[in-house]
Amino acid sequence: MPIEKHTWICGVDEAGRGPLAGPVFAACVVLNPDYRIEGLADSKKLSEKIRTKLEIAIKTHSIAWAIASASVDEIDQLNILQASLLAMKRAVESLTFTPDQVLVDGNHRPYLNFPIQTIIRGDSLIPEISAASILAKTARDAEMMRLHQDFPHYGFDRHKGYPTAAHIIALQKHGISSEHRRSFAPVKKLIMQYRP
């Protein structure tokens, strides 16, 4: 009896384009076609508890997965879009085998030598991309919790670096940390205000 050959589809997504601080993360996932993970969805629509549960399932039952990031310095040097694509490229290229197709959330593609298709709202439509969005989000949240230990007065544990009112107030009070994105308008504005 011939062995069935699967088409290995790799879903890719990022997390952290909007925050004022911290790296941007990307993940890629090749799901096991013989094991269905229930509840996969856009990570932004899931509670932290459910994301954590799904993260374990994805890492345990997927054929392959990888997570990568681009630093704050790279975000400021390249711009957030290019840094996001760089993180995606790093994630896919760290896989131990070559997928047959790469499906990327959104309408921009990373520079990869694989067949790539971009899909608007792919994180809601394609299970592989949903899984990638969950891994990227949980990895980034974990990094922001780690950064909170170094910079507790900004509240990274609560807003994860996003531009909430509390974060802006903390920036105005404590100034800009090494983890803040200087190319982002609210941070850049503060830099200009404090220049002699």
Image: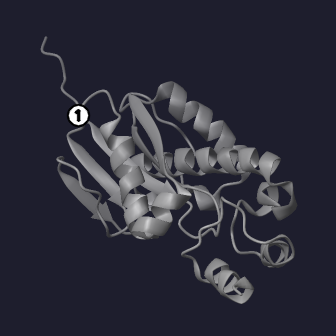
Quarter placement of the N terminus:
top left
Q: Label 1 belongs to which residue?
A: 98
Q: Is residue 145 above or below residue 61?
A: below
The picture places residue 46, in percent across and down from the top left corner, at 65, 55
Question: Three-letter amino acid code at disc 1?
Answer: Thr
51 vs 83, nearest the viewer: 83
Would residue 123 appear left or right of 95 to someone viewing this image? right
Identify the residue shown where x is 64% and y is 70%: 20
Residue 139, image x, y percentages = 60, 44
Residue 103 screen position, x and y as percent: 30, 53
Left of 112 or right of it: where is 184?
A: right
Picture residue at 39% right of the left edge, 43% below the top: 91
Q: Position of residue 15 (x, y in %)?
A: 54, 57
Viewed as shown, does residue 57 lie left or right of 157?
left
Q: Is residue 122 visible?
A: no
What residue do we see at 34% from left, 33% from top?
95
Q: Nearer the viewer, residue 55 or 70?
A: 70
**Does residue 20 lie above or below 73 as drawn?**
below
Which residue sits at x=51%, y=60%?
73
**Residue 109 visible somewhere in the drawing:** yes
SS class, disc 1: loop
Q: Is residue 165 above or below residue 56?
A: below
Task: Write down the quadrant of residue 154 in the picture.
Answer: bottom right
The answer to which of 193 and 33 lies nearer the viewer is 193
Neighbours of disc 1 within 10 Å: few (<14), some (14-19), many (20+): some
